[in-house]
DNA sequence: AACGCGGGGCT
DNA sequence: AGCCCAGCGTT
């Protein structure tokens, strides 16, 4: 593993994020486990802008798991209707509220909740509780498969290992947030490499811009 | 690990 | 109408 490149990326993205943090209500360090969980639960397959529009109102209507428990699936669905997936999500949310007095804090236990997979479990634990664990979704995969194209493994388990190795010590929360913002702003599906702090050592940029062999570029 | 799926977005 | 897709569920 190219440790110097790893370190350059770590330092680079943390620096980049200083001036490019997106601010959302659920990113307040004071947000409760429930508040962060609700946000992450809504954010899967849903643009952050959409979530931002219903989130404050949802929280005032449902400030706790108990409030969810005292409601019903139809009302919940109404409250999150603009997000889409309202039936699936309202049902799962109600089930969670019915089965838990309070949310578990261990990612493994969070993973047990209905409609909560590895991504939501890890993101919740990291952002709400500062758990030092990697998050890995399509966006993170896109970044790493470009920057570390020659080292980024195929198998999910090895990817998790690799992603864990990249975490800066004690700064998982800041780093993971930076990854998401970086994926949204720079390392987009159509990447803005000219604006990217990593373009001097990114394998993708090197292979597409240098064009040493002239045999044409590839698209991921 | 591999596959299936509901549903939202884009064409 | 049809295709693509991310993330969760199931096997």
Image (cartoon, coloured by chain):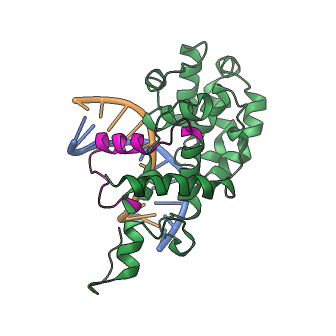
Chain colours: A green, B blue, C orange
- Is-magenta flag for residue A89? no
Write down the region rendered in magenta. A147-173
A53 left or right, relative to A149:
right
Q: Nearer the viewer, residue A133 or A171?
A: A171
A194 left or right, relative to A163:
right
Farthest residue in the front direction?
Answer: A4
C6 left or right, relative to A153:
right
Q: Is residue A99 above or below residue A75?
A: above
Query: How far across and down, in percent of the image, does residue A81 sit?
Result: 65, 42
Query: How far across and down, in percent of the image, does residue A18 sit?
Result: 67, 54
Q: Residue at x 63, y 50 (%)?
A: A48
Q: Is residue A186 above or below residue A174?
A: below
Q: Residue at x 57, y 72 (%)?
A: A195
Query: How far across and down, in percent of the image, does residue A111 sit?
Result: 44, 27
Q: Quadrant of the C terminus of chain A?
A: bottom left
Q: Is residue A198 above or below residue A110?
A: below
Q: Residue at x 61, y 27 (%)?
A: A73
- Is-magenta flag for residue A152? yes
Picture quadrant where residue A129 is located: top right
Query: How far across and down, in percent of the image, does residue A206 sit?
Result: 38, 73
């Amino acid at each position: 593993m190219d440790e110097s490149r790893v370190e350059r990326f770590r330092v680079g993205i943390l620096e980049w994020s200083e001036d490019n943090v997106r601010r959302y209500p659920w990113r307040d360090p004071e947000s409760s486990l429930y508040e962060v969980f609700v946000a992450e639960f809504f954010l899967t397959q849903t643009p952050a802008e959409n979530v931002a529009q219903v989130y404050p109102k949802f929280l005032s209507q449902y400030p706790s798991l108990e409030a969810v428990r005292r409601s019903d699936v139809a009302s919940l669905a109404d409250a999150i209707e603009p997000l889409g997936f309202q039936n699936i999500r309202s049902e799962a949310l109600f089930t969670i509220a019915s089965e838990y007095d309070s949310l578990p804090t261990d990612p493994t236990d969070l993973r047990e909740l209905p409609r909560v997979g590895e991504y939501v479990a890890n993101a919740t634990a990291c952002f709400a509780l500062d758990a030092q664990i990697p998050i890995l979704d399509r966006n993170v995969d896109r970044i790493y498969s470009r920057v570390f194209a020659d080292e980024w493994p195929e198998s999910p388990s090895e990817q998790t290992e690799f992603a864990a190795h990249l975490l800066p010590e004690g700064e998982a929360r800041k780093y993971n947030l930076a990854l998401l913002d970086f994926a949204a702003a720079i390392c987009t599906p159509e990447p803005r490499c000219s604006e990217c702090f990593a373009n001097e050592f990114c394998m993708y940029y090197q292979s597409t811009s240098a064009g040493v062999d002239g045999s044409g570029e590839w698209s991921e």
